[in-house]
Amino acid sequence: MAELTAVVGIGQTKYQSKHLDHSMPSLVRVAAEKALADADCTWADIDAVILGKAPDMFEGVMMPELWLNDAIGGAYKPMLRVHTAGSVGGSTGIVAASMVQSGIHERVLCVAFEKQSESNATWALSISMPFSLASVAGAGGYFAPLVRGYMRRSGAPEDTGIRVAVKDRQNALKNPLAHLQLEDISFDMVANSPMLWDPIRYLETCPSSDGACAMVMESEALASKRSNKVAWIHATEMRSEPTQFSGRDQVMPQATLDNSKALYKKAGITNPRKELDCAEIYVPFSWFEPMWMEGMRIAPINEGWKMTYEGATALDGDFPVNMSGGVLSSNPIGASGLIRFAEAARQVRGIADAHQVDGAKKALGHAYGGGSQYFSTWIVSSEKP
Amino acid sequence: MSDDKNDPVEIFRGHVELDYQYTAGVSASRFLRAVEQGKFLGQKCPVDGRVYFPSRGSCPMHAVPFGDDSTVELPDKGTVVTYSIVRVPSENIPLELPYITVQVLIDGADTALGHVLDANLDDVRMGMRVQAKWKPKSEWTTSMANIEYFVPIDEPDADYETYKEHI
Ligand SMILES: [Zn+2]
């Protein structure tokens, strides 16, 4: 049985298109110091450090963990780099938790980041392989055909994606850290924005952001002594599958269905829609909200869009999703998964300020990546299991 | 350290070049030599008989190599299983915007091939029947670029049930 572990500190930079005030080391350090401050710790209190970021090709800095080790306080301490494509932030949180759950360390710091202003993600994701034709323009080019597949099989109304985008952008207005702050956001504004990768419109996509997120996690022995609220980790789960095999369901991959099943089993959850108070889900393109509501077994297959339509996923709905404004409002890719995990922890700690879900006790954090093939999830709670 | 009181970071664009040789390997070489002759070769999984095209020489599901006798010749026709109309430029994609990306399920294959479709934007749809438009024979090399794009053909649309598992 794993040691019970808790999130006791969370730090985030502001998410924005260009952090001209920070180099990469400075960016990760700011998030880490904020997490230490939140946890009322110093660098000396940390036993090990975990760093996560998306492909090195983005910024063109190979193995940045070596360069950033000093900045994240990793000198003379165990340090590990995590990389699982877009899901990496989530995996980073899970790896950090496992360092404590395994009984190896008492207190661990994890940091995840991306500096998209020094990067060219679309280029890095559109590499032409020898002998093949390069035609997939970035992540949007990859995911748009899958969104079309979902629309076809679910029969969801065509404006479902627009409704998700409006909702997440409204939530972002309550989160001062969110990158996109569109005061005059409206249905028409999203609907009339240019079609980029048909059927995905400009305002249904995530921005390119700079930013870093960090968390401090502790053993039960240490966390139990704290007087402020901590987020107890009830369950973590990672699943993956190959990008290409015959019969692969790319719209609803087996790996996501296996992930959610295993996660709820570990957490002792039989009815996630009822037993979870809210969820922060990785939605880089609006339609992935209904798709992952199904993948996470919160809605029946082909019915995830109904939750969006009925307003269930709004901040004042019965199952709020992406309270922070989500990936649609801030996307420092490598950090994006950890931000989802951090938002789940903030909610159950009751420190999510203007985007707090009243009385949230149990929350889901979720990330996915690659060609919808890597999934990282966790469930945190204000109470011990 | 504060979040906003540092001197601005200077960002400049540097040029990095990396030359490398790519060895195609046995399976891809066989596939590319066929493409050089204007033919499509797939490989059949010995476990479940599914045909991979293009094939990487082994089955990712069953973790078995495709033997020499697994090769099957395929036509250059297929069905559009899903698509997108792209209006976003990418510096390493030399196509004029907007263009249509398609996932084509080649007849007889059990995996879809990503390519480009030359068609009226209003006509493209799931289930559309298409065929490869090859470059002039004199320009053929060991490359999928031998196919300029796919074009619609005058055949009734494929039934959704026949290709839905390949989306
Ligand atoms: Zn097989």
Image: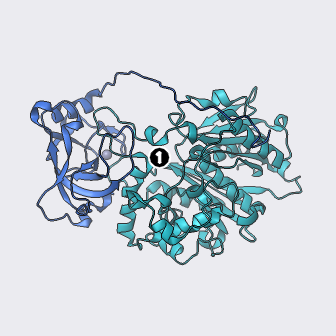
Chain colours: A cyan, B blue
Q: Is residue A385 visible?
A: no
Residue A187 image position (x, y, % from top left): 51, 71
Q: Quadrant of the C terminus of chain B?
A: bottom left
Residue pictured at 67% horizontal, 30% vertical:
A68
Residue A89 in the figure: left or right of residue A361: left
Task: Compare residues A22 and A226 and report the one nearer the observer.
Answer: A22
Please tell me whether residue B24 is drawn above or below residue B124 in the rendered image: above
- What chain letter is assigned to the residue under label 1? A
Please indicate whether residue A242 sits to the left or right of residue B113 in the image. Answer: right
Which is nearer the eye, A109 or B86? B86
Left-right relation of A37 to A81: right
Q: Amino acid at mark 1?
A: Gly
Q: How many marks?
A: 1
Position of residue B45 measured from the top left corner of the image (x, y, whole percent): 27, 44
The quarter of the picture where residue B143 lies is top left
* Residue lying at 37% horizontally and 37% vertically, measured from the top left: B92
Q: Name, please, the residue furthest toward the bottom.
A: A310
Q: Is residue A124 left or right of residue A173?
A: left
- State the image coordinates of residue A381 (x, y, percent, origin top left): 73, 61
From the image, tell me which residue sits under label 1: A370
Can you say whether A122 is above or below A259 in the image?
Answer: above
- Does the closest atom of ligand 1 sit within 8 Å of the Cβ of label 1? no
Secondary structure under badge 1? loop
- Residue count near mark 1 (Cα–Cα under 10 Å), binned few <14, some 14–19, many ≥20: some
Residue B72 visible at all: yes
Q: Quadrant of the N terminus of chain B?
A: top right
x, y percent for residue A215:
73, 46
Instruction: Determine the residue positioned at 55% across, 60% down.
Output: A260
